[in-house]
Image: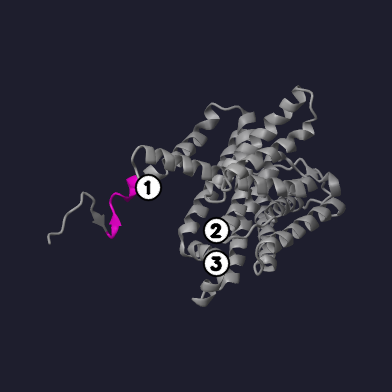
Amino acid sequence: MAISHTRETRIGGVDSAAPPRWIADHFAILLLGLVLVLLPAVASNFVLDQIVGWTLILGMIALSLMFLAGYGGMVSLVQMTVAGLAGYMITVFGASSLPSISLFWPWWVAAPVAIIIAVAFGTLAGALSARTEGIYTIMITLALASAFFYLTLQNWSIFNGFNGFTTIPAPIFLGINWKSPVALYYLILFFAGLSYVTVLYISRAPFGLALQGTRDNPRRMEAIGFNVTAHRIAAYAFAALIAAIGGILLVWLNNQISPGTAGIEATIDLLVIAVVGGLGHPIGAFIGALIYVILRTFALDSLVAVGLDGRRFQTIIGLGFLVIVLFSPDGMIGLWRRWSARARSQTGKSPR
């Protein structure tokens, strides 16, 4: 039998058609990235800071939750706490409006120390909850989040109680004041993009595949020699790193931090963001964050304009959450996948 030759050739064991196929599969993400890079040329500072900046930061923190829940099957409610701890530590070790508390270390010392402390806390949370599943994981991480909230609320010597900190400067590096709207926007965009690409890469790397195996069948993974607990703790540590960086960026963007930043309400909001966007793909965290930020920014003013209490904003968020979960338990990503599959079936193309 003659061997038929295809139009595609292989070079070094790699399909020469791989780059174009990869570009086609990720065209929407690449296009979105290009739009975000060029956005400061046409967008106002309000859009850069209050809409896109907040979306990217909340998306990063929600991405850490998506990584644990989507790939590891661990619904952790401690990710906003990790972010809040990093934010508090950059304020305590760095500069703020309270010289009696802040140590005024240079940012290139304060930031790594804050990240290390936050990652250590996230890893400890993982060690405490890695041997549990389902509701028990949720309860342990929720208890840690609650404990941290009340610690910051009642402790004045380190966290300044319910007042928190204000006037927190962003660093000046390479002759650039990273507090300026455009510079801070690009700083946030860089770390958000790096977090997204890293999570996407790890999900397909041996560690990510093993983590997904522990999610689907932990007993079988133990039987073939994998340390399920160690993989879960390592996942918590990696997720804490993303959340910690997001927490520091959030403090630099918001110029303040208080117990409410990592309170129970913020913790639940983060869970809503991750679920609404979808836990099946890293981009879902940013989609959920965008929906949340738009509703938070404009729904509040709309309610006040029609004579309703602005606090009903949370009711709108809750109703939207219920609607999306009822029609698509896997969030906006699930809706998009079903729509894409239906469109391909109508055009006679089989879904990939």
Instruction: Specify the quadrant of the image occupied by residue 328.
Output: top right
Say which residue label 3 marks. 214
Mark 2 lies on a secondary structure that is helix
**Residue 123, x across and y down, in percent:** 66, 64
For this orientation, the residue located farthest to the left is: 2
Report the span colored magenta: 12-22
Instruction: Specify the quadrant of the image occupied by residue 308.
Output: top right
Structural distance between the alpha carbons of marks 1 and 3? 28 Å
On screen, 173 above or below 48? below
Q: Residue at x 62, y 66 (%)?
A: 233
Structural distance between the alpha carbons of marks 1 and 2? 22 Å
Q: What kind of residue is marked 2?
A: Tyr
Q: What kind of residue is marked 3?
A: Thr
On screen, 238 above or below 84? below
Image disc number at residue 71: 2
Q: What kind of residue is marked 1?
A: Trp
Structural distance between the alpha carbons of marks 2 and 3? 9 Å
